[in-house]
Image (cartoon, grey):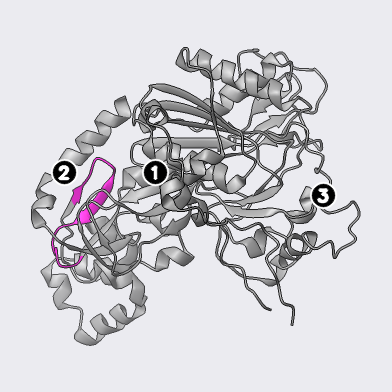
Amino acid sequence: MIVWKRACRSARPSTRPLSSRRCLSQRTLDGLERPVQSYISTSRDPYLNLSIEHFLLQKSAPESTILFLYINRPSIILGRNQNPWLEVNLALLNASGHDELETEPPGLGIVDLVRRRSGGGTVFHDEGNVNWTVICPSKDFTRDKHAEMVVRALRTCSVDRARVNVRHDIVLDQGEHALCTDPEDTHSTPYQLAEADAIRPLKVSGSAYKLTRQRALHHGTCLLSSPNLNIIPDYLHSPAKPYMTARGVESVSSPVGNILLTNERFIAAVQEQFAKLYGAVDDAKDVGDEWREHSPVCKGYDELKVTDLPTTI
Amino acid sequence: MSAAIAGSGGALAKVLQRPAQGLARCSHQQYLRLRAQRPAHARGLTAGTRALQKKYTEDHEWIDTSNPESAAIGISSYAAKALGDVVYVELPTIGTSVSKGDAIGAVESVKSASDIMTPVSGEILEVNSVLEDTPGTINKSPEGEGWLARIKVENVSELEGLMDEGAYKAFTEEVAEK
């Protein structure tokens, strides 16, 4: 019988008395009414970043459009309707926190396991990956619109192999410069190979969505310089999968690669393209630990923990 | 209604759709045999010839108004088509009290988790557990076998503000033009 301890960091409830907790300023709350808003997180806590993202979705003005950028410490982010038993190497996740495995290459230490609110598959976040979110009115939403915006941002940084694929993800084509394509077309590149070709494009960004009555949220990853590409497949492969029949949305695996840009350069490029698309916007507002104390954010924080793991086998 | 019956009734449907002379030729034993061949869960909405009186919301949900004590709700064919292939359905919890417009569940399709809102206030009485194993039922029969839940309508007057089939069709044509 194996006793599994959760190596994941838990969301710790605040022990500070309610009266001394800082809340968001009125100025910050008023800012949620602006027609175009831009935020960037100073926190690496995936629970906090996703809670802030959900708060922005729920509380921003229905006609507003928002850009939110954040980076998480090493964490595995499950899709809303996924089964962790099928998607994640739970034994590796558990062992990593206790240095019990001598893995080759070395494990990452503690890795958070988080269930996000949007659909789609499982992804790995670390400090070499920047997450981008755009929230807009439902009537203005299409699945490709903001992936196209990010591709334009990448192309301004000379990443001209980037394009949006049929799954609304961003890939880097791996062929020689052979085709003549429209440079404005974000769905094709001169390096594109035929679908049947042996060399698949490398996925650098995956998209997922959450659609409510009035608002649409599109968020995506962007692999810029992750040092962990070689061991991500180990974490995202479940040895239990062939032996289980379970409900849950399955991930679609793709070969991945780094774009090799700095986080800062990518962030600046995305903010610039967002401003170009939606008109001038105030400088991005920092969000961080102080938002944790705001009641709706705090409530959402614990909801993101993956609680359906066993304590014993 | 005939489309819903034809989709799930099979041989029984053909018997029911014949004119009266045809029904007279179907013996009672034959009727019982044919009815027993239909799976129990498929009798949910289409047993018998009771007409579903559907009304629709601007969020593309429908509600069967023929029995407000236990009204079936679901998403419209228009919505199901727009969503794409549904891969997961989150159903509400039986016994929950909900208000009109509350999100009572969600469907996942094309990596999107889309909220489903209740057209009326009331209490959730039953959920369609078929959707847990075969979420694609929503695409095959969104306004029939793909019903999501049954609700006890708290305030029947809320039904009056909803669109009938003709008005909803016109509404979807207007939306498509935009």
Read off the chain for label 3. A
Q: Kindly report the distance in space between the C-alpha atoms of the residues bearing marks 3 and 2.
A: 55 Å
Quadrant of the frame with the C terminus of chain A? bottom right
Give the structural element (helix, strand or loop) at label 2. Answer: loop
Viewer-nearest of discs 1 and 3: 3
Which numbered tag is attached to residue A87?
A: none
Q: Relative to the observer, which residue lies in front, B41 or A102?
A: A102
Residue contact between numbered discs 1 and 3, judged by CB atoms under 8 Å = no
Question: Picture coordinates of residue A150 (x, y %)?
Answer: 61, 24
Question: Picture coordinates of residue B72 (x, y %)?
Answer: 24, 61
Q: Kindly report the distance in space between the C-alpha atoms of the residues bearing marks 1 and 2.
A: 19 Å
Query: Could one spot residue A88 in this view of the protein?
Result: yes
Quadrant of the frame with the N terminus of chain A? bottom right
Q: Amino acid at mark 2?
A: Met
User: Where A76 falls versus A39 (above or below)?
Assistant: below
Viewer-nearest of discs 1 and 2: 2
Give the structural element (helix, strand or loop) at label 1. Answer: helix
Residue appearing at x 38%, y 21% in the figure? A35
Taking the image as shown, residue B69 lies to the left or right of residue A312, namely left
Mark 2 residue crowding within 10 angstroms, few (<14) / some (14–19) / many (20+): some
Query: Could one spot residue B11 in this view of the protein?
Result: no
- What predominant SS class does the magenta segment belong to? loop
Q: Which residue is mark 2?
A: B163
Tell me the quarter of the picture where residue B27 sits.
bottom left
Q: Which residue is mark 1?
A: B81
Question: Picture coordinates of residue A6 (x, y %)?
Answer: 67, 65
Q: Which residues lie in the magenta part? A: B55-70
Question: Picture coordinates of residue A293 (x, y %)?
Answer: 47, 45
Q: Which residue is mark 3?
A: A231
User: Where B7 falls versus B57 (above or below)?
Assistant: below
